[in-house]
Amino acid sequence: MPTPKTLATSLARLSSTAYRHSQRIHTQSRVTGALLQQPMRHSARPVPSATLRALIPSHRTFTTTTPRRHGHVTPPKPGEELYVTFIDKDGEEYKFAVSEGDNLLDIAQANDLEMEGACGGSCACSTCHVIVTDEGYYDRMPEPEDDENDMLDLAFGLTETSRLGCQVKMTKDLDGLVVRLPSMTRNMQASDFNN
């Protein structure tokens, strides 16, 4: 195994050789088309292309953002809690304090309830189907859009107060909402019907 001093010396030599080689390539790229057609001569000791790429400036950038995962909910601020109750297929009730703006799919998944959300909340399946138990609360919700109605047509156990959990956002008007989860779901997405 090389000593640290020998390794540092080798890396320094490699870096200077790679730099000279990259300068040669840069100079050669400015040559007219006729000269480019002639065969190029290479040094006796080729430099790995990864080393060259590291030395040549690039205009590319790389950025990342924190991905939003299923079941992401914002914890409610003290005094601003809204409450929603889920009744599962076995009749057990689960009451949660949530924030305004959270949707029912994310709330259910964040609390490990059985709600699949196969399409990721994009209104392209019916696996987050919920049944609003009180018509008064159902009437306070915005009307379902055409996309939601199309997906609800595929839902198992459809009722007059059925909604997709991904499309129902909690508001102050919905504080105290109670929804029932159907006994089963159909995992049929809009893409299943494309020819």
Image (cartoon, rainbow, N blue to C red):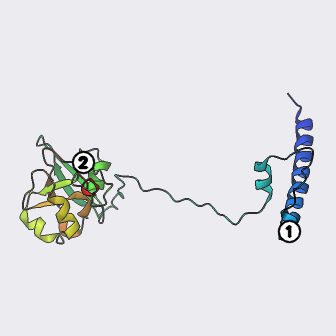
Of 166 and 108, nearer the camera is 166
Q: Is residue 112 left or right of 173 when viewed as pictured?
A: right
Report whether residue 105 is seen. Answer: yes
Pick the front one: 108 or 124: 124
Kind of residue sitting beneath label 1:
Ala
Q: CA distance from mark 2 to mark 1?
A: 67 Å
Foreground residue among 25 and 126: 25
Marked residue nearer the N-terminal end (2 or 1): 1
Image marks 2 and 1: residues in contact by CB distance under 8 Å: no
Residue 188 or 64: which is nearer the viewer? 188
The three-letter amino acid code for the residue at tag 2 is Met
Q: Quadrant of the N terminus?
A: top right
- Which residue is found at the position 87% from the left and 60% from the top? 38
Q: Nearer the viewer, mark 2 or mark 1?
A: 1
x, y percent for residue 48? 80, 46
Q: How many marks?
A: 2
Name the residue tied to disc 2. Answer: 115
Q: Which residue is mark 1?
A: 34
Q: Image point 15% across, 44% down: which residue?
A: 184
Residue 175 visible in the current orientation: no
- The disc label shown at residue 144, or none: none
Q: Residues within 10 Å of mark 2 (few under 14, many from 20)?
A: many
Q: Quadrant of the C terminus?
A: bottom left
- For label 1, count other residues whose C-alpha is less than 10 Å away and answer few (under 14), some (14-19) or many (20+): few
Residue drawn 46% across the image and 56% down it: 67
| Disc 2 secondary structure class | loop
- Percent coordinates x, y for residue 154 in the rendering: 16, 55
Relative image position of residue 178 (x, y in whole percent): 14, 56
